[in-house]
Image (cartoon, rainbow, N blue to C red):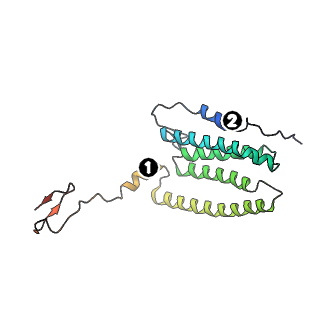
Amino acid sequence: MLKQQPHSLLDPLGSAASLGFGPNIEESTFLIFGGALIVDDFTTVIKIILSLSAFSSILLSLSYIQSQKIDSYEYVVLTMFSTLSMLLIASSYDLISMYLAIELQSLSFYVLAAFQRNNEFSTEAGLKYFVLGALSSGLLLFGESIIYGFTGITNFEELTKFCLLWVPPVVPTTTLLQLDGSPGATTGMGEITS
């Protein structure tokens, strides 16, 4: 049996170290994995926020883990897997990559919900969360398959272009009477024409 090491302040530093390994982006956008993931300034900022949140949540939970005598390394590993999946969700540029990232996050959260094996409430919470997650995952996959069936597209940018084709153009507002009571219409700038 493996000897379990006590947690230290070095555990959350693993999530903080992931910030330094990201690509150095200077206002550029590029796609990776065949267009499934995007890396741009927005996703980089979101990833930094998520990494700092994971760092702080692990740091804040260390005292709770020690007080509950949960001295196992799995907690930090599962938290890091859920953080990884959040980073993948932030970079998703495709319905399929978004679904896979959400499922990776869900699996980590299922185990974290039932983490205290000796507590019946924790086991019940994990089971209920698994059933609810399976139902919501099925509904999400059903909705994505309907979108793909109607459009034949899974890429978010292409879906946006497709949806914008169906938006009606902006119609200027019209009025029946001008200020003096004669028939007329207003243009988009608010000028009254007769």
Task: Tell me which amino acid carries mark 1.
Answer: Glu
**On the image, which quarter does residue 168 sit in?**
bottom left
Element at badge 1?
helix
Residue at position x 72%, y 52% in the image: 112
Q: Residues within 10 Å of mark 2 (few under 14, many from 20)?
A: some
* Quadrant showing the N terminus: top right
Task: Tell me which amino acid carries mark 2.
Answer: Leu
Q: CA distance from mark 2 to mark 1?
A: 39 Å
Pick the front one: 150 or 115: 115
Residue at position x 69%, y 64% in the image: 131
In the rendered image, which residue does mark 2 sit on?
A: 13
Element at badge 2?
helix
Asked if residue 41 lies left or right of residue 140, the reply is left
Residue at position x 17%, y 69% in the image: 176
Asked if residue 29 lies left or right of residue 73, the reply is left
Q: Residue furthest right?
A: 1
